[in-house]
Image (spheres, rainbow, N blue to C red):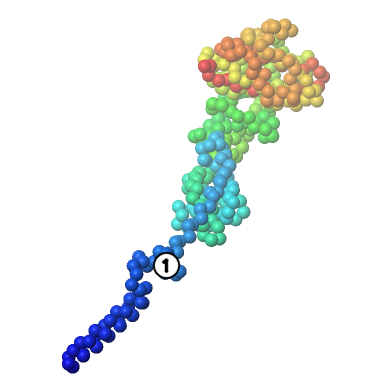
Amino acid sequence: MSSILRYLSARAIFSATLTLLLAACGGGGANPPAGSGEGGQDPVGMSPSPEKAAKVLPKPVLSFSDTGLSVSDGVTHIGAWQVSSLESWEYSFDMGATWTRGQGDFFDVQGDGAKTIWVRARDDQGNTSEIVVVSCVLDTMPPAAVQADLVSQDFTRLVKVNGVEAQGRWEYSVDDQRTWLAGSGDRLALLGNALPVLWLRQIDLAGNKSPVERVNLQETSSTTWHEASGNPLQPSFLSLQQARTVVVHGSVVRGDADYVRFDIPVGQRLQSMRLVHYVSADPIAFFALQRAPVFDAGIDVKRMLVYGHMGPQDLNRNVVQDVTPNQLSAGPMTLWFQQTGPQATDYAIELVFQSAP
């Protein structure tokens, strides 16, 4: 009997323990999926909440002054970049290894050479925009002054321009550097007696200007310091000497007209004829151009290619702009310039030639 009592007592203890375990697990009904509470929902604090998504900021907009011969080649002598951003911004010169917080609406690139720049918006919470990658070539060094070699032929003074950098250009001034005119090719031909000094400079690809070169034109002992002929049937001859840019300059007064002949070479045509210098108390002079080796049109305007009054209001106006190209092609031309008033007038007229199509 004692063994039976011990067996029954052990079963009673096991049954009571099992009842307690089932009660602790929610009773005898179907258990919910592991990790779920009532109704299959996560109990508060039992699982981590998803991470907050990072905010992407709008990209900044950048711009800079592309200087020099082209405004789209990325070469400049101005290192300032403008930044437009709705947020704070930062920039990097080492592909993002280090960043510098921007101030205001611009930053400066320093040190000549090719540059790759990263810029992005960034707020106080550390959110950033996509990186904007820009590049430029900074060149702040002025080119050397050009060298002018002077050659004389008859009445024409030829200035050969040397030392222009590759992809650079040169300019000239006839009014003591107040205004500058674009040169073409590698030479400039001049005839006349009104411009004592010519100024030359070059501008490189980035827009840097060289020191100025001074060229003396007033050599009274030379035939190139020449007062143009006053005889329409014997005009002074201007030798182009392969120059694409030519300047006729003179000083006229009542009764002292200037007549100058030039021959447009085969394969070229006259592209422009502009008054580029005018000094006089009288704002009105007279010009005409005839397609002939002499000026025998007289006052018959039907025989003139162009004609009319010319003064300060006409500076830089291309007076042959409306002439048909075939009338400006190879052959002789004679220019007439005259002042009918008593005031002396100094003038300079630029002729530019180009290859005929």
Task: Name the residue at the right extreme.
Answer: 342
Is the residue marked by circle 1 packed among few (<14), some (14-19), or many (20+) residues within 10 Å?
few
Left or right of 48: which side holds 174?
right
Q: What's under tag 1, amino acid-wise?
A: Glu
Q: Does the image show residue 268? A: yes
Q: Position of residue 41 (x, y in %)?
A: 42, 64
From the viewer's perspective, tell me whether residue 175 is left or right of residue 263: right
Q: Quadrant of residue 145?
A: top right
Q: Residue at x 57, y 44 (%)?
A: 63
> Label 1 belongs to which residue?
38
Instruction: Tell me what residue is drawn at x 79 percent, y 16 percent.
Output: 340
Nearest the eye: 32 or 266: 32
The percent position of residue 109, horizontal first and vertical second, equals 54, 50
Number of labels in the image equals 1
Quadrant of the image occupied by residue 89: bottom right
Give above or below for 74 relative to 259. below
Please indicate, yes or no, whether residue 261 appears anywhere in the rendered image: no
User: Which residue occupies 61% across, 13% down?
Assistant: 324
Residue at the spot 63% in from the left edge and 30% down from the top edge: 181
Which one is nearer the viewer's eye here, 156 or 287?
A: 287
* Quadrant (top left/top right/bottom left/bottom right) for the N terminus: bottom left
Q: Secondary structure at mark 1?
A: helix
Q: From the viewer's perspective, is residue 304 above or below residue 187?
A: above
Q: What x and y, as percent, mark residue 76? A: 55, 42
Q: Position of residue 137 (x, y in %)?
A: 50, 43
Q: For the view shown, which residue lies furthest in the bottom direction?
A: 2
